[in-house]
Image: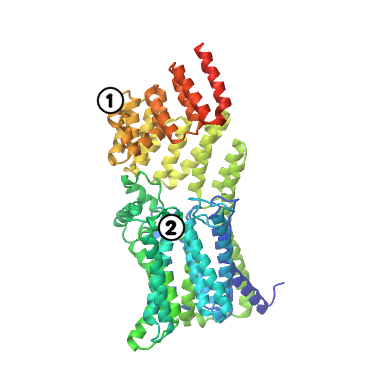
Amino acid sequence: MLPNSNGMKDLLKWVMYGAVFTVPFVLLIVSGSMFFPFITGKNFAFRILVEIGFTAWVLLMLIDQVYRPRLSYIWYAILGLLGVMFIANLFGEYSPKSFWSNYERMEGWVTLLHFSMYFVVLGSALTTEKLWNRFFNVALVAAVIMSLYALGQVSGVTEVSQGANWRVDGRLGNSSYLGVYMLFHIFIAAWLLIRTKAINLKILYGGLIALFVFILTQTGTRGAVYGLIGGSILAFLYLAIMAPKGAAIKKWALGGLLVVVLLVGGVWSIRDTEFVKNSPVLSRFAGTTLSEGNIRFMVWQMAIEGVKERPILGWGQENFSYVFNKYYNPALYGAEPWYDRTHNIFFDWLIAGGVLGLFAYLAILISSLWYSVLQPFYVRLKNGVDTHIHFSVYEQALILGLLAAYMFHNLFVFDNLASWIFYAVVLALIHSRVSYEWKSISSITFSQAVWHNVVLPSGAVVLLLTIYFVNVPSMLAAQNIIDAYRATGVSPKLEMFEKAFNRGGFADQEIFEQTAQVGGQLYSNPAASESDKEAIVNLFTRLEGEMMAKKPNDARLYIVASNFYRTMGDLNLTMSSLDKAEKLSPNKQAIKEEQGVVYMMAGRSEEAIERFQTAYELDERNERGKVRLATAYLFADNQAEFEKLINLETLHENPGLLSVVINEPLLLSVAYQKKDYPLLEFITKERIQVAPSEQGLRTNLAALYFEQGKYGDARTVIEKAIAEIPAFKAEGEALLEEIDSAQN
């Protein structure tokens, strides 16, 4: 039996507030049972909590006018962004991904919708300062837990998930994500500090600010740190200018400004000292130069070309990879091969939604700045009085500093769940202060009977269906991928991948790629039976057919397919896939070089040379491309052309080229195939110089001499290795016996 209406209202309040207050803790989730454990668990939990909280709010506001939504320019701007991006995604390059994203990012329109829903619930439910203070204190509890984990990483007790060991990432799996997370919580702690009168709480919040600033620096996230510095300077300047005449805060603001400037200037002035150079944190920030942003700048230029092609509504969310492939800059030969973000929030929105999308996104920022900073500033200029309308001058300065810091950070990265959540929090905080009654909604009434007997059960059904269809299939598929990796045997692995793909979730491309990778490994295993190989090929080709039908213009899919077919040894299908990839990304050297490798495998040396030559000429600074072209000449027995590109006698004059030569697997493979002993000896000796304790290199060098009948040289190498590497003694003595036996 259902409780009465009042009892149900109380239950819905608990559900709504419970969901709202639990959201900050989802960022602590790391789901080892799902693919992309630092992303999927958090995002699915966020979506489900928002769906629950939003449903409870809708049911409440229909029967209780206290919870009815109120209007503001921020509300309109968010609705505008939702609407513009819905249309942009609908007509974008690949709509399904634009709406649903993938496991690696879990953004797209669905996340934008949940961000908007969370904003609405926050702005409608947290209507008093008491509630906001409670929410912020709960958020700080979650941030302290995150910080303790990060401190464990600083001390070496817990491991850093990715990147440099010293760049902590907490439970977020990415140091940049933790950086912006700390940026928001510095603001939250500062907000509570200025609003409380209790000295002990001021000390507590001040200590938390110091802790969060320390963790922020340990992330090594330059955008967030520079944003914090710039935001602090802006906030102090604003206080110094806008605070009432004679107020002590003016002096404190100027003092704070001076401290920030002196700290930054001090670190900069000693940037060349050993103290700074020996500190990973300080050296990273003090050694920043514009040249380090060259890769970003080239990606942005490619983004501009994409915007020129589709200026009004863009390509749809999550579709920058098409622009990256189509307008690939060959100067990026040394960077990562696939970019799905421009690493600049403004270019990201231009690509996703064109000029309209960027305008809609900026409208949110501008409307929030209007209420919190610009309107008070305008009123003061107009009236000449200290009328700050909805926010005190301290609050204005804090909001201005945070939004400036956040946007500066986003000049070089992109949003993630952590930033989406707390951007919604800040926007809802402003909205809750400035919003006004929505009269047409306020006048709507529902009878208790209709609400209790029709609306309530209908809402419960809609919620359950939403949770299931939005989340469950993709959650199960994410688990199936992990199950496939953990399974033993070919059939169980294939069964899990097939089950994941058949779930009908949103990550079919990632499932296809993982199937191709694992399937290729299984196929190349000498223990694989013919029936196993047939099953692998059948599953791969079925998934490939479905993916190519869905995304015929995605170069990455053809590269994945070519790698699988190359593992199979089917060079015709390999080349066919590479040819399709090249048409979609004509300036990408890696594709042309792969074509060259396949031609070499087929014994077609002239065509291999042409492919490597074309790749190298796209950017002749590419030393890896130069070495690969030289390798093609070596394969074709054209020693003269090889030596024009690689002269072993003068190679030490170019350390960069030398490093590529001694570490290029293709060159080493062809040198062994051609029995080019001088080249092999050169490479092996150079690698020994780099890694003198690596026993295998000494053995390889001795084997080269042994093959040539240079037993004395082989003996000398082994004896020297025994002397320099004590652990090699037993193996070395056994090798010496083999050499002596061969001589006799």
The amino acid marked with disc number 2 is: Leu
x and y percent of residue 308 in the render? 29, 56
Residue drawn 50% across the image and 34% down it: 693
Task: Please give left or right for residue 603 compared with residue 500 in the image.
Answer: left
Mark 2 lies on residue: 282
Badge 2 marks a residue whose secondary structure is helix
What secondary structure is marked by label 1? helix
Residue 675, compared with residue 171, is above or below; it is: above
The residue lying toward the viewer, choosing from 493 and 181, is 181
Residue 170: x, y in percent? 54, 58
Say whether residue 202 is left or right of residue 628: right
Front-most of residues 628 and 492: 628
The outermost residue toward the right is: 1
Residue 617 image-quadrant placement: top left
Residue drawn at 61 percent across, 39 percent down: 492
Mark earlier in primary sequence (2, 1): 2
How crowded is the residue under tag 1: few (<14 C-alpha within 10 Å), some, or many (20+)?
A: few
